């Protein structure tokens, strides 16, 4: 089993991983930028190493500094969390070259599945349903030929992308060239790779993902699915498990996800993501890492996914079988962001003057903030995740409303009231929503009183 793990991340996910390691008797090493010297993950780790200045490029994206920190502290493994270097195959390869265990799939699998165009090609081979579009990256002229075959509307997407970056919607054929070059430019800036591919736009779909976990002994399991359809500009806002899809479709998605993981000999935790229209589901990508929303799956299954990641990376075989995994009740997660929804969701870094977190059965708050914590302007605006578990979906909604009402974050604007408006919306309560929900109802969702 692993003895010492370096966490190559910050914020709530770093805290989450450190706590899991401590519960397993594994020593921890935190890394931090100069802006994060007072952060919670630095304080609770067994050791902490400064790896650079505030800018992510000088710290959390600086591979050599992170590897040096691991070597100098004797860490035998690195957990990348999510974001930053978590899906970077070059970093995974660098770990392998330095004989450091990368907690996730190996660099070759990460490279294959991290390339969205290559991933679609592999899924076609595995007979997993994919969105109609190009087989791989396309030139401008190739993209236009694909457009003629599948029609508009369509999406131009970055092969190395994620989080909605390097993505453009084309609704008229004469818009294609401008959108093509805009997607390439944004992809180059965000991912240092400007390759793009083209696929049919599935209008207002559900966004459903299946959590899988696999060991090196050929055991592949699914842990159910999550509905991540409540999004703003392709960024998830609320996630829940399970979804409200028909059982027949959910079972088909589970089989598809297992088939996908087996086809690429996947090892460790991962997520198969789908878009779902009224009748069909289509593979869109595989995330080769832990997801922000993994706690809702943990709540309904009782399985600690980070703990399983650490066990698998340490060479252990999965103890459970598929029939052992039961989905019980309903879980919801909301992302608490330091932002001002009424001013175009403008980030709102600053000093947290007072923090009060609700407690109770089935309530969990994953965060790195505390009273007198300074929220940095250099990183993502998410400062925490509230997760609740109820015996039914309606019970979970009510529990989340109560938790949000009690949560106090003073000193900076947050999106708490905006989240409450979503949870109160009758369409959300009925389960009548898709990825266009926030855009459709935005004016009403911003009508809360302060």
Image (tube, helix red, strand yellow):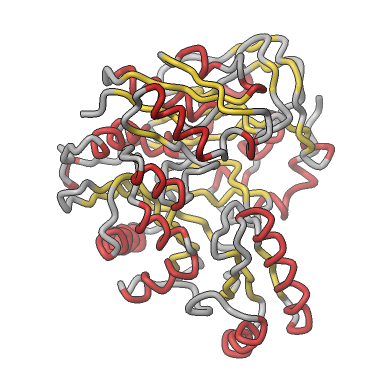
Comparing 393 with 229, the one in front is 229
Q: Is residue 407 visible?
A: yes
Question: x, y percentage for residue 152?
Answer: 66, 80
Question: x, y percentage for residue 7?
Answer: 44, 29
Residue at the spot 33% in from the left edge and 51% down from the top edge = 106
Residue at the spot 64% in from the left edge and 12% down from the top edge = 355
Q: Is residue 281 visible?
A: no
Residue at the spot 66% in from the left edge and 60% down from the top edge = 188
> Which quarter of the rendering shows the N terminus?
top left
Question: x, y percentage for residue 70?
Answer: 41, 29
Judge left or right: residue 132 versus residue 439: left
Question: x, y percentage for residue 193?
Answer: 60, 62
Comparing 13 with 77, the one in front is 77
Residue at the spot 33% in from the left edge and 49% down from the top edge = 105
Q: Is residue 210 above or below residue 382?
A: below
Judge left or right: residue 64 versus residue 172: left
> Which quarter of the rendering shows the C terminus?
top right
């Amino acid at each position: 089993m692993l003895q010492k793990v370096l966490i190559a991340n910050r914020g709530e996910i770093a805290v989450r991983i450190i706590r899991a390691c401590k519960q397993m008797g594994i020593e921890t090493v935190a890394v931090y930028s100069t802006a994060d010297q007072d952060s919670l993950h630095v304080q609770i780790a067994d050791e902490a190493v400064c790896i650079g200045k505030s800018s992510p490029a000088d710290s959390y994206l600086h591979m050599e500094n992170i590897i040096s920190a691991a070597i100098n502290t004797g860490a035998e493994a690195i957990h990348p969390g999510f974001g930053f270097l978590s899906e970077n195959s070059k970093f995974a390869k660098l770990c392998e070259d330095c004989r450091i265990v990368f907690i996730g799939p190996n660099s070759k699998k990460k490279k294959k599945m991290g390339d969205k165009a290559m991933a679609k090609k592999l899924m076609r081979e595995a007979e997993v349903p994919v969105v109609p579009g190009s087989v791989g990256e396309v030139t401008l002229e190739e993209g236009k030929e694909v457009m003629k075959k599948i029609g508009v509307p369509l999406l131009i997407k970055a092969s190395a992308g994620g989080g909605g970056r390097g993505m453009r919607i084309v609704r008229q054929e004469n818009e294609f060239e401008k959108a093509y070059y805009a997607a390439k430019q944004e992809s180059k800036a965000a991912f240092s790779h400007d390759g793009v591919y083209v696929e049919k736009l599935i209008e207002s779909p559900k966004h459903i993902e299946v959590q899988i976990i696999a060991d090196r002994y050929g055991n592949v399991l699914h842990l159910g699915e999550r509905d991540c359809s409540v999004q703003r500009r392709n960024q998830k806002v609320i996630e829940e498990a399970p979804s409200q899809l028909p059982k027949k479709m959910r079972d088909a998605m589970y089989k598809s996800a297992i088939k996908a993981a087996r086809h690429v000999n996947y090892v460790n935790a991962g997520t198969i993501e789908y878009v779902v229209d009224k009748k069909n589901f289509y593979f869109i990508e595989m995330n080769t890492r832990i997801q922000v929303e993994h706690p809702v799956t943990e709540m309904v299954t009782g399985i600690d996914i980070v703990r399983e990641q650490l066990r698998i990376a340490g060479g252990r075989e999965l103890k459970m079988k598929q029939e052992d995994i039961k989905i019980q009740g309903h879980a919801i997660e909301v992302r608490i962001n330091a932002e001002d929804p009424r001013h175009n969701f403008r980030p709102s870094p600053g000093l947290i003057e007072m923090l009060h977190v609700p407690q109770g059965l089935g309530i969990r708050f994953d965060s790195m903030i505390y009273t007198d914590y300074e929220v940095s302007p250099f990183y993502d605006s998410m400062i925490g995740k509230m997760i609740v578990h109820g015996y039914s979906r309606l019970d979970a909604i009510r529990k989340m409303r109560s938790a949000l009402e009690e949560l106090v974050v003073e000193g900076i604007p947050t999106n708490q009231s905006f989240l409450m408006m979503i949870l109160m919306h009758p369409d959300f309560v009925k389960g009548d929503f898709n990825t266009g929900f926030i855009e459709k109802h935005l004016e009403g969702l911003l009508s809360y009183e302060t």
